[in-house]
Amino acid sequence: VVQDASTRALGKWLTADVAPELLALAKSLKNHKYRVRSMRAYIRVIQQFGLPPEQRLEMAREALRAAQRDDERILTINALLQFPNPDSLALTTDQLSNPALRDTAAQIALSMVDQINDKGALRNAMQEVATSGANPALVKQAEDVLSRLGA
């Protein structure tokens, strides 16, 4: 009852200062339901609060390290769309090695293309997508971006 009430209340918290507690709960709770609730609330903080991109990126890294399920990892890399930059793009493409995340990571990386001005970072990311074994349509899109970049 206490875990239910506390994770529910923390999950609805309206400021980002709740994040460290949510992450600690997501890492330590034994009850699957409350651990998942805490992790999802932590990811919500990454998405919804106007934190600096560097802080969001570090929180996303922490979430990926703490995640025990692929759907939590997918939610985390989806949160990276909120702050597209070369670092969040690189963190996204780091997930291409996980077969369960490959297509989602490729799609998110492709979604960031028009929002990132660093051609080197884009070239690296699109080369990773193109050689990742992702869905052929996503690979083709990455190859098209590489062609536009002159790679």
Image (cartoon, helix red, strand yellow):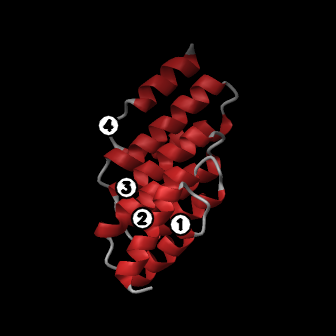
Mark identifier at residue 86: none
- Label 1 sits on a secondary structure element that is helix
Specify few, some or many for label 3: CA neighbours under 10 Å numbering under 14, 14-19, or 20 or more: some
Amino acid type shown at disc 4: Leu
The residue wearing badge 4 is: 14
Task: Choose the circle earlier in sequence order: 3 or 2.
Answer: 3
The residue wearing badge 1 is: 129
**Towards the viewer: 74 or 35:** 74
Contact between labelled residues 1 and 2, with CB atoms less than 8 Å apart: yes
| 141 versus 33 height, above or below | below
Dot in front, 4 or 2: 2
Q: Position of residue 137 (x, y in %)?
A: 47, 57
Task: Choose the circle earlier in sequence order: 1 or 4.
Answer: 4
Please identify the quadrant where the N terminus is shown. top right
Specify few, some or many for label 1: CA neighbours under 10 Å numbering under 14, 14-19, or 20 or more: many
Specify few, some or many for label 2: CA neighbours under 10 Å numbering under 14, 14-19, or 20 or more: some
